[in-house]
Amino acid sequence: MRKLKYFREKKKLTQKELAEMLGLATITIRSIENGDRNPSIDTAKRISIFFDVGMDELFPDIFLLSDGTKSIKNKTYISQ
């Protein structure tokens, strides 16, 4: 999740600072940035709101939010 790291560093925040601001554990931010885990929808939403960026822009390999579809790990689901 290199985009998360990009936006975090752009705001000159450490992983710990970002985690504290979002009410998350530092290991959560580190794991997401390293690609060891995907964020939950709630966590992705919190991060995208914080950076004022869409989830699909922050996590393009997880979320594809267009035309009423959402793609998670190469599986596409139709939103209803």
Image (tube, grey):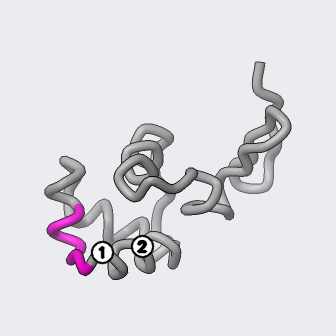
Question: Horizontal and vertical percent for residue 48?
Answer: 45, 52
Question: Horizontal and vertical percent for residue 33?
Answer: 42, 73
Q: Quick one: quadrant of the C terminus?
A: top right
Which amino acid type corresponds to the residue marked 1 in the rendered image?
Answer: Lys
Magenta segment includes 36: no
Residue at 82% across / 30% down in the picture?
78
Residue on which disc 2 sits: 7
Which amino acid type corresponds to the residue marked 2 in the rendered image?
Answer: Phe
Q: Which mark is residue 71?
A: none
Residue at 32% across / 72% down in the picture?
30
Q: Is residue 79 above or below residue 6?
A: above
Query: Quick one: label 1, few (<14), some, or many (20+) residues within 10 Å?
Result: few
- Judge left or right: residue 23 versus residue 41: left
Q: Are marks 2 and 1 in contact (CB under 8 Å)?
A: yes
Q: Secondary structure at mark 1?
A: loop
The magenta stretch is: 12-18
Residue at 18% across / 55% down in the picture?
21
- Judge left or right: residue 26 versus residue 6: left
- Judge left or right: residue 19 versus residue 77: left
Question: Horizontal and vertical percent for residue 75?
Answer: 80, 47
Residue at 41% across / 77% down in the picture?
5
Q: Which mark is residue 11?
A: 1
